[in-house]
Image (spheres, rainbow, N blue to C red):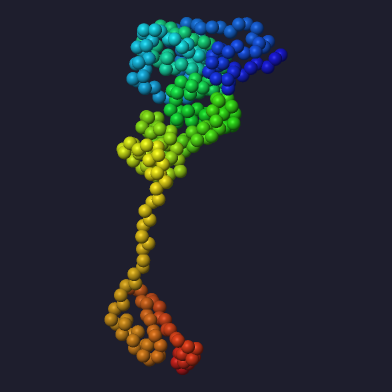
Amino acid sequence: MAKKPSGGLGRGLSALMADVAPEKTESEERPRRGDQMIPVEKIVPNPDQPRRHFTQERLEDLARSIREKGVIQPLILRKGPKDDGTFEIVAGERRWRAAQMAQLHDVPALVRDYSDTEALEVAIIENIQRADLNAIEEAAGYRDLMDRFGHTQEKVSEALGKSRSHIANLLRLLNLPDEVQDLVIDGKLTAGHARTLVTAENPIALARQIVSKGLSVREAERLAKAPKAEKPAKTKVKPEKDADTRALEADLSAALGMKVSIDHKVGGQSGQLSVRYATLDDLDDLCAKLGG
Protein backbone atom coordinates (compact mmCIF):
# COMPACT_ATOMS: atom_id res chain seq x y z
CA MET A 1 0.00 0.00 0.00
CA ALA A 2 1.29 3.43 -0.86
CA LYS A 3 2.37 5.59 2.05
CA LYS A 4 -0.13 8.23 3.11
CA PRO A 5 1.16 11.77 2.55
CA SER A 6 1.85 13.93 5.55
CA GLY A 7 -0.82 16.44 4.55
CA GLY A 8 1.30 18.91 2.62
CA LEU A 9 3.30 20.27 5.56
CA GLY A 10 5.94 22.70 4.39
CA ARG A 11 4.07 23.66 1.22
CA GLY A 12 2.22 26.60 2.75
CA LEU A 13 -1.31 27.18 3.94
CA SER A 14 -2.90 26.90 0.50
CA ALA A 15 -1.64 23.32 0.13
CA LEU A 16 -2.77 22.46 3.64
CA MET A 17 -6.27 23.68 2.85
CA ALA A 18 -6.38 21.44 -0.24
CA ASP A 19 -6.22 24.32 -2.71
CA VAL A 20 -3.34 22.42 -4.29
CA ALA A 21 -4.18 18.91 -5.39
CA PRO A 22 -1.83 16.31 -3.84
CA GLU A 23 -0.72 13.20 -5.63
CA LYS A 24 -3.35 10.46 -5.78
CA THR A 25 -2.71 7.50 -3.50
CA GLU A 26 -4.57 4.30 -2.73
CA SER A 27 -5.84 5.82 0.52
CA GLU A 28 -7.41 8.73 -1.38
CA GLU A 29 -9.73 6.87 -3.72
CA ARG A 30 -12.70 8.79 -2.31
CA PRO A 31 -12.81 12.53 -3.12
CA ARG A 32 -12.06 14.83 -0.21
CA ARG A 33 -15.04 16.62 1.27
CA GLY A 34 -15.47 20.30 0.58
CA ASP A 35 -16.92 22.94 2.87
CA GLN A 36 -19.47 21.75 5.40
CA MET A 37 -21.73 23.82 7.60
CA ILE A 38 -20.98 22.82 11.18
CA PRO A 39 -23.05 24.01 14.18
CA VAL A 40 -20.98 26.31 16.37
CA GLU A 41 -21.98 24.39 19.50
CA LYS A 42 -20.41 21.24 18.02
CA ILE A 43 -17.04 22.96 17.70
CA VAL A 44 -14.50 23.01 20.54
CA PRO A 45 -11.17 24.89 20.72
CA ASN A 46 -7.88 23.05 20.49
CA PRO A 47 -6.00 23.09 23.83
CA ASP A 48 -2.74 23.14 21.85
CA GLN A 49 -3.74 26.21 19.86
CA PRO A 50 -0.55 28.31 19.64
CA ARG A 51 -2.52 31.54 19.81
CA ARG A 52 -3.47 32.28 23.42
CA HIS A 53 -4.57 35.93 23.31
CA PHE A 54 -7.53 37.35 21.41
CA THR A 55 -7.98 41.12 21.35
CA GLN A 56 -11.57 42.00 22.15
CA GLU A 57 -11.59 44.99 19.80
CA ARG A 58 -10.41 42.90 16.85
CA LEU A 59 -12.97 40.20 17.66
CA GLU A 60 -15.73 42.80 17.62
CA ASP A 61 -14.50 44.15 14.26
CA LEU A 62 -14.51 40.65 12.80
CA ALA A 63 -17.97 39.96 14.25
CA ARG A 64 -19.34 43.07 12.51
CA SER A 65 -17.83 41.89 9.23
CA ILE A 66 -19.31 38.41 9.69
CA ARG A 67 -22.77 39.87 10.32
CA GLU A 68 -22.56 41.65 6.96
CA LYS A 69 -20.75 39.12 4.78
CA GLY A 70 -20.67 35.86 6.72
CA VAL A 71 -17.61 33.71 7.38
CA ILE A 72 -15.66 33.93 4.12
CA GLN A 73 -12.70 31.75 5.11
CA PRO A 74 -13.77 28.28 6.29
CA LEU A 75 -12.45 26.90 9.55
CA ILE A 76 -10.20 23.84 9.50
CA LEU A 77 -11.47 21.15 11.87
CA ARG A 78 -10.78 17.58 12.83
CA LYS A 79 -12.99 15.11 14.70
CA GLY A 80 -12.98 15.57 18.45
CA PRO A 81 -10.76 13.22 20.44
CA LYS A 82 -13.74 11.77 22.38
CA ASP A 83 -15.56 10.75 19.19
CA ASP A 84 -18.76 12.31 20.56
CA GLY A 85 -19.80 14.17 17.44
CA THR A 86 -17.77 17.28 18.25
CA PHE A 87 -15.09 18.85 16.07
CA GLU A 88 -11.82 20.31 17.32
CA ILE A 89 -10.48 23.51 15.77
CA VAL A 90 -7.21 23.16 13.89
CA ALA A 91 -7.26 26.69 12.47
CA GLY A 92 -9.79 29.50 12.74
CA GLU A 93 -10.56 29.88 16.45
CA ARG A 94 -10.82 33.67 16.11
CA ARG A 95 -13.42 33.27 13.34
CA TRP A 96 -15.34 30.79 15.51
CA ARG A 97 -15.35 33.18 18.47
CA ALA A 98 -16.43 36.11 16.30
CA ALA A 99 -19.16 33.99 14.67
CA GLN A 100 -20.62 33.32 18.13
CA MET A 101 -20.53 37.05 18.88
CA ALA A 102 -22.39 37.59 15.57
CA GLN A 103 -24.95 34.95 16.75
CA LEU A 104 -24.38 32.58 13.83
CA HIS A 105 -25.74 29.06 14.31
CA ASP A 106 -23.26 27.33 12.03
CA VAL A 107 -20.03 28.10 10.17
CA PRO A 108 -18.35 26.76 7.00
CA ALA A 109 -15.53 24.34 7.71
CA LEU A 110 -13.15 21.85 6.16
CA VAL A 111 -12.90 18.63 8.16
CA ARG A 112 -9.51 16.96 7.90
CA ASP A 113 -7.98 13.84 9.42
CA TYR A 114 -4.91 15.40 11.04
CA SER A 115 -2.63 13.88 13.66
CA ASP A 116 -1.67 15.92 16.72
CA THR A 117 1.60 16.95 15.07
CA GLU A 118 -0.04 17.96 11.81
CA ALA A 119 -2.79 19.87 13.62
CA LEU A 120 -0.25 21.91 15.54
CA GLU A 121 1.83 22.58 12.42
CA VAL A 122 -1.24 23.69 10.47
CA ALA A 123 -2.33 25.98 13.32
CA ILE A 124 1.10 27.58 13.51
CA ILE A 125 1.34 28.04 9.74
CA GLU A 126 -2.14 29.53 9.50
CA ASN A 127 -1.53 31.99 12.30
CA ILE A 128 1.96 32.96 11.10
CA GLN A 129 0.82 33.56 7.54
CA ARG A 130 -1.96 35.75 8.87
CA ALA A 131 0.53 37.49 11.22
CA ASP A 132 -1.83 36.70 14.09
CA LEU A 133 0.74 35.32 16.53
CA ASN A 134 2.90 37.52 18.72
CA ALA A 135 6.57 36.56 19.01
CA ILE A 136 6.13 34.68 22.31
CA GLU A 137 3.19 32.63 21.02
CA GLU A 138 5.10 31.82 17.84
CA ALA A 139 8.16 30.75 19.85
CA ALA A 140 6.00 28.64 22.18
CA GLY A 141 4.49 26.90 19.15
CA TYR A 142 7.94 26.04 17.83
CA ARG A 143 8.94 24.79 21.28
CA ASP A 144 5.84 22.56 21.39
CA LEU A 145 6.75 21.01 18.05
CA MET A 146 10.26 20.30 19.29
CA ASP A 147 9.48 19.11 22.82
CA ARG A 148 6.27 17.18 22.27
CA PHE A 149 6.86 15.75 18.82
CA GLY A 150 10.66 15.45 18.68
CA HIS A 151 11.20 17.94 15.85
CA THR A 152 14.62 19.55 15.42
CA GLN A 153 15.06 23.20 14.50
CA GLU A 154 15.92 22.05 10.97
CA LYS A 155 12.68 20.06 10.74
CA VAL A 156 10.58 22.95 12.03
CA SER A 157 12.36 25.28 9.61
CA GLU A 158 11.61 22.98 6.68
CA ALA A 159 8.00 22.29 7.67
CA LEU A 160 7.04 25.90 8.30
CA GLY A 161 9.14 27.66 5.67
CA LYS A 162 11.05 29.76 8.17
CA SER A 163 14.82 30.18 8.37
CA ARG A 164 16.57 28.33 11.17
CA SER A 165 18.04 31.61 12.48
CA HIS A 166 14.52 33.07 12.74
CA ILE A 167 13.36 30.08 14.76
CA ALA A 168 16.47 30.07 16.96
CA ASN A 169 16.15 33.79 17.71
CA LEU A 170 12.50 33.43 18.69
CA LEU A 171 13.19 30.41 20.92
CA ARG A 172 15.70 32.51 22.86
CA LEU A 173 12.87 34.86 23.85
CA LEU A 174 11.40 32.08 25.99
CA ASN A 175 14.42 32.47 28.31
CA LEU A 176 13.31 36.00 29.24
CA PRO A 177 11.53 36.58 32.58
CA ASP A 178 7.74 36.24 32.51
CA GLU A 179 7.25 39.97 33.05
CA VAL A 180 9.24 40.77 29.90
CA GLN A 181 7.38 38.09 27.91
CA ASP A 182 4.06 39.58 29.05
CA LEU A 183 5.14 42.98 27.68
CA VAL A 184 5.73 41.33 24.29
CA ILE A 185 2.36 39.55 24.44
CA ASP A 186 0.60 42.82 25.31
CA GLY A 187 2.28 44.57 22.37
CA LYS A 188 4.28 46.96 24.56
CA LEU A 189 7.58 45.46 23.38
CA THR A 190 8.37 44.19 19.90
CA ALA A 191 10.34 41.02 19.19
CA GLY A 192 13.24 43.29 18.21
CA HIS A 193 13.16 44.97 21.61
CA ALA A 194 12.96 41.61 23.36
CA ARG A 195 15.97 40.21 21.48
CA THR A 196 18.16 43.01 22.84
CA LEU A 197 17.26 41.92 26.39
CA VAL A 198 18.10 38.21 26.09
CA THR A 199 21.69 38.64 27.27
CA ALA A 200 21.10 41.71 29.47
CA GLU A 201 22.06 41.50 33.13
CA ASN A 202 18.75 42.99 34.30
CA PRO A 203 16.20 42.52 31.49
CA ILE A 204 13.18 43.49 33.61
CA ALA A 205 14.57 46.89 34.57
CA LEU A 206 15.68 47.58 31.00
CA ALA A 207 12.30 46.49 29.61
CA ARG A 208 10.47 48.87 31.95
CA GLN A 209 12.78 51.68 30.87
CA ILE A 210 12.23 50.93 27.17
CA VAL A 211 8.44 51.00 27.63
CA SER A 212 8.35 54.11 29.82
CA LYS A 213 10.60 56.10 27.48
CA GLY A 214 9.19 54.69 24.24
CA LEU A 215 12.64 53.74 22.99
CA SER A 216 13.22 52.40 19.49
CA VAL A 217 14.97 49.07 18.95
CA ARG A 218 18.21 50.90 18.12
CA GLU A 219 17.98 52.91 21.30
CA ALA A 220 17.21 49.73 23.26
CA GLU A 221 20.32 48.07 21.79
CA ARG A 222 22.48 51.00 22.89
CA LEU A 223 20.92 50.92 26.33
CA ALA A 224 21.53 47.18 26.73
CA LYS A 225 25.15 47.51 25.58
CA ALA A 226 25.97 50.62 27.63
CA PRO A 227 28.82 49.92 30.09
CA LYS A 228 27.79 50.11 33.68
CA ALA A 229 29.45 52.77 35.81
CA GLU A 230 32.11 51.13 37.88
CA LYS A 231 32.10 51.82 41.56
CA PRO A 232 35.32 53.44 42.75
CA ALA A 233 37.59 50.97 44.48
CA LYS A 234 37.54 51.33 48.18
CA THR A 235 40.96 52.13 49.59
CA LYS A 236 41.78 50.95 53.02
CA VAL A 237 42.69 53.82 55.30
CA LYS A 238 44.83 52.82 58.21
CA PRO A 239 43.59 54.28 61.48
CA GLU A 240 45.87 56.96 62.93
CA LYS A 241 48.14 55.64 65.69
CA ASP A 242 47.63 56.99 69.16
CA ALA A 243 50.34 58.99 71.02
CA ASP A 244 51.35 56.07 73.25
CA THR A 245 52.01 53.80 70.27
CA ARG A 246 54.06 56.48 68.50
CA ALA A 247 56.11 57.07 71.66
CA LEU A 248 56.79 53.35 72.06
CA GLU A 249 57.91 53.13 68.41
CA ALA A 250 60.33 56.04 69.02
CA ASP A 251 61.79 54.45 72.18
CA LEU A 252 62.36 51.07 70.49
CA SER A 253 63.83 52.70 67.38
CA ALA A 254 66.30 54.64 69.55
CA ALA A 255 67.24 51.57 71.56
CA LEU A 256 67.82 49.35 68.53
CA GLY A 257 69.15 51.99 66.17
CA MET A 258 66.64 50.83 63.54
CA LYS A 259 63.15 51.88 62.46
CA VAL A 260 60.47 50.08 64.45
CA SER A 261 56.77 50.01 63.48
CA ILE A 262 53.91 48.77 65.66
CA ASP A 263 50.51 47.83 64.16
CA HIS A 264 48.06 47.13 66.97
CA LYS A 265 44.49 46.03 66.18
CA VAL A 266 42.03 48.56 67.51
CA GLY A 267 40.13 47.16 70.47
CA GLY A 268 42.10 43.90 70.36
CA GLN A 269 44.97 42.29 72.23
CA SER A 270 47.13 41.31 69.27
CA GLY A 271 49.19 43.18 66.72
CA GLN A 272 52.40 43.18 64.75
CA LEU A 273 55.85 44.67 65.41
CA SER A 274 58.27 45.08 62.53
CA VAL A 275 61.91 46.18 62.51
CA ARG A 276 63.54 47.50 59.35
CA TYR A 277 67.28 47.11 58.94
CA ALA A 278 69.41 48.81 56.30
CA THR A 279 72.38 46.39 56.12
CA LEU A 280 73.28 42.84 57.03
CA ASP A 281 75.45 44.21 59.79
CA ASP A 282 72.33 45.83 61.29
CA LEU A 283 70.62 42.45 61.14
CA ASP A 284 73.55 40.80 62.95
CA ASP A 285 73.41 43.48 65.65
CA LEU A 286 69.66 42.93 66.07
CA CYS A 287 70.09 39.17 66.36
CA ALA A 288 72.84 39.65 68.93
CA LYS A 289 70.70 41.97 71.04
CA LEU A 290 67.69 39.64 70.90
CA GLY A 291 69.86 36.62 71.64
CA GLY A 292 71.61 38.26 74.61
Does any portion of residue 148 appear in the rendered image?
Answer: no
The tally of labels here is 0
Compare residues 205 and 227 and report the one nearer the observer. 227
> In which quadrant of the rendered view does residue 145 lie?
top right
Left or right of 188, for residue 285: right
> Residue 121: x, y in percent?
54, 22
Q: Residue furthest left?
A: 243
Q: Residue furthest bottom?
A: 292
Q: Residue at x 67, y 11 (%)?
A: 25
Q: Residue at x 39, y 85 (%)?
A: 259
Q: Residue at x 53, y 18 (%)?
A: 13
Quadrant in which the N terminus is drawn? top right
> In which quadrant of the rendered view does residue 254 lie?
bottom left
Would you place residue 6 above or below residue 39 in this image?
below
> Residue 185: x, y in percent?
40, 30
> Residue 61: x, y in percent?
35, 16
Would you place residue 266 above or below residue 211 in this image?
below
Does any portion of residue 114 appear in the rendered image?
Answer: yes
